[in-house]
Image (spheres, helix red, strand yellow):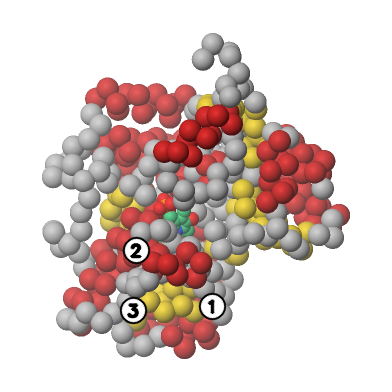
Amino acid sequence: MDNMPVDMPKFIEKAEHVLMHTYSRYQIVLDRGEGVYLYNLNGKKYLDFAAGIAVFALGYGNKEYNDALKNQIDKLLHTSNYYYNVPTVEAAEKLKKASGMDRVFFTNSGTEAIEGAIKLARKYYYNKNNRTDSEIISMNRSFHGRSMGALSVTGQPQYRAAFEPLIGGVVFADFNDISSVKEKVTDKTCAIIVEPVQGEGGLYPADREFLVDIRKLCDEKDMLLIFDEIQCGMGRTGNMFAYQGYGVKPDIITTAKALGCGVPVGAFAATEKAAAAFEPGDHGTTYGGNPFATAAVSKVFDLFESEQLLAHVNEISVYLVQKLDELVGKYDFILERRGKGLMQGLEFKGPVKDYILKAMDKGLIIIAAGANIIRFVPPLVITKEHVDEMICILESIF
Ligand SMILES: *Cc1c(COP(=O)(O)O)cnc(C)c1O
């Protein structure tokens, strides 16, 4: 492009002719990234506090990560799951260790990880009861993905309405309200699915007692507890997985987003007891866990260790929380801050869209979670200086 300014509105008009209208996109064309900064086609620089929706934990252009991918491209990209390959097994070992689960199934996305978790829970029930009338309890305000199964357990009517009938046997309870969960339990309940920190639904952390009580309920009735850690997992809350901070272990865990740090990959993992329900033929995927995607996963786990990211998140998130709390104290149109670690939200009295657009003009990328909440899910490698820069831009807008 030879440094010629690109006519972005014209490019965007072209884009709107070829892409399906499923998003109201922000009017910028992103071109490259470096550290925690993104650049548009004309070289305008943005501080990135969204990380591609909680994906790019390592920041952009991590050399070791990029080299690992380049090496794998030259070696072998794909094999199918009819055979074994080294990166998949290495990545599975690392995920097993990090998640405390026993067995791993790699997918291409978060929504597919949820599909797998739902199928595993149903199969567990089927094996036990030889019946196909199982029910799943999910939470109001939850978000689990866009495919029909994942949408069926997503507790936000606006995403579901047009796509009914969804899969049956799903009932919704109130998050952080154990009595509402107990009301929904029947002898057909095969699983309870919960995000330890609700993301899309508005950055609501679970109360510890709630998760403890749900665990107890699942143990009593031999139901499987599924934690959707697609957003809150992979170090975001300061633990590798959020459940470890709560001390409440699920039977099945789903992960994606930062698992591949940009390469599309997800996984569901389960304890031996739950995983044993699957037999050959029960589930499959062509791409899932291919050596390219899992080379990324494997390197991501290595870098979490060598760069001591968990310790960093625990340190820097204290500073972010302090700065966000100062904003809450200073501006009466901000109602509260919620979240855990580097997964934070500010709830406003009214819509936040204008703030997000103005921030973008000033070189800051932030995203919403619902109409009134700004979500902060930056790369995990941000420093105090980045937090200060972000706060400074927000203050100039407020
Ligand atoms: C993003 C997300 C999903 C869906 O993942 P995709 O990769 O977009 O399919 C599911 N659950 C939670 C908690 C998420 O944040």
Cα distance in 3D space between marks 3 and 1: 17 Å
Nearer the observer, 124 or 15:
15
> Residue 373 at x, y = what percent?
66, 58
Q: Disc 1 designates what residue?
A: 174
Q: Residues within 10 Å of mark 3 (few under 14, many from 20)?
A: some
Nearer the observer, 236 or 245:
236
Q: Amino acid at mark 1?
A: Asp
Q: Is residue 382 left or right of residue 63?
A: right
Say which element carries label 2.
Answer: helix
Nearer the observer, 16 or 218:
16
Say the numbered circle drawn on residue 367: none
> Residue 199 at x, y = what percent?
55, 59
Dividing the picture into quarters, in which one does residue 224 lie? Answer: bottom left
In the displayed structure, would residue 130 be above or below residue 73? below
Residue drawn at point x = 75 percent, y = 51 percent: 324
Q: Is residue 42 left or right of residue 96?
A: right
Say which element carries label 1.
Answer: loop
Q: Is residue 172 left or right of residue 311?
A: left
Residue drawn at point x = 64 percent, y = 59 percent: 371
Q: Disc 2 designates what residue?
A: 148
Q: Residues within 10 Å of mark 2 (few under 14, many from 20)?
A: some
Can residue 194 be seen here? no
Say the numbered circle drawn on residue 169: 3
Dividing the picture into quarters, in which one does residue 102 lie? Answer: bottom left
Q: Which circle, 3 or 2, is nearer the viewer?
A: 2
Instruction: Verify CB contact (< 8 Å) between mark 3 and mark 1.
Output: no
